[in-house]
Image (cartoon, rainbow, N blue to C red):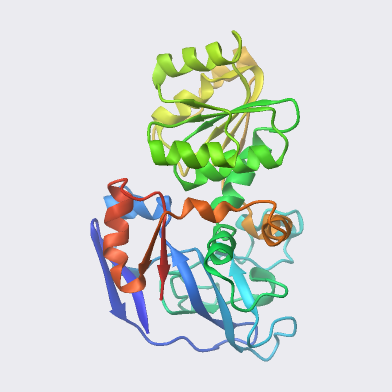
Amino acid sequence: MRATIIHGPGDIRVEDRDYPTVQLPTDVVVKVTASCVCGSDLWPYRGVKPTHKPSAIGHEFIGTVESVGADVKDLAVGDFVIAPFVVSCGQCPQCLNGVTVACDHLAGWGGKDDTGLRIDGGQGQAVRVPLAESTLVKVPGVTDPDDALRASLLTLSDVMATGHHAALAAKAGPGRTVVVVGDGAVGLCGVLAAKRLGAERIIAMSRHADRQAIAREFGATDIVAERGDDGVAKVRELLGGVLADSVLECVGTKESMDQALHSVRPGGALGFVGVPTGGAEAPLRFLFDTNISIAGGMAPARTYIPELLADVLDGTINPGRVFDTVMPLEEAPEAYRAMDERRAIKVLLTP
């Protein structure tokens, strides 16, 4: 099969790999119908996160079950499924408490399962899924989604679930004012999540017209292009002299965290989901003095998917709008370049 392999900074290749097979009784093999490039994939692409050896990459995919292991009872060949961005067992204390990203048997796509067997990356034609019944989410009544539904289902694998996590962590809800820092796919999904939770006013911080348009479509009431102190002043102006009740940090840099922290009112809440890239440590004295609460981290997508899936299927939300570019898998290197150069918000890959 064909699969995307990262060899080092700026070096993405699509290469031949062995087609996956069931190796454990709890495995299934999924034929991938759509995958995508994530903003966090850009950290190794840019060299921020080291690549020690050529590795399969990609952690967001949807597709059709092709084969099942002997112990798999709740999934069958032909089922259409969503893969969260990590593998989880569903039975350990963390999973039972909804924190599937801290599973005792946690594994990542492109890595190895806890038996040491290799797992395929999501940006390929097929994937062996360990612990399949607890990891995958079956999409009821769907076998061949149209393009729009396919895109929205794919967002549940990561970015929509992550935006939802940020909104929950920031306590977005009825009567609350919200600022979203970051206008990538996660930030845009954060806008949609805040709207879905009933936020009264949503300010999206963005300098790009195409992203601003989607933010408004998703529920943003205001756009702030300014940054730093000017951005904080604009938020205060828009909110009548006060700062936001809730702020979503969806980037992961020191600058984005500073922007987020200084955009939330004393006693407000900040939800952070941007993968930290260094330098974004929480200033404890500032938090102590302002009583700002911080929560967030890696989103437990497997926990959120069923709830969000229901809203996608009934048309309440359409997060797939964050995909502004579709490319064949063979063009994965160009997909990375397009996102790295901000020529694309998020690229959907079709095997």
Q: Is residue 22 visible?
A: yes
Provide residue 231's location: percent of width, then percent of height: 44, 19
* Residue at position x 71%, y 66% in the image: 90
Q: Residue furthest top?
A: 241
Is 201 displayed left or right of 159 in the figure? right
Provide residue 69's location: percent of width, then percent of height: 63, 89
Q: Is residue 243 above or below residue 156?
A: above
* Residue at position x 69%, y 60% in the image: 309
Q: In the rendered image, which quarter is residue 152 located in? A: bottom right
* Residue at position x 70%, y 85% in the image: 72
Q: Is residue 243 above or below residue 206?
A: above
Q: Is residue 155 above or below residue 231?
A: below
Provide residue 350's location: percent of width, then percent of height: 42, 72
Q: Nearer the viewer, residue 208 or 138?
A: 208
Provide residue 235's location: percent of width, then percent of height: 52, 17
Is 46 displayed left or right of 180 in the figure? left
Q: Nearer the viewer, residue 5 or 106?
A: 5
Say which quadrant the N terminus sits in: bottom left
Q: Nearer the viewer, residue 216 or 182?
A: 216
Q: In the rendered image, which quarter is residue 195 located in? A: top right
Q: Is residue 47 visible?
A: no
**Number of numbered markers:** 0
Say which quadrant the C terminus sits in: bottom left
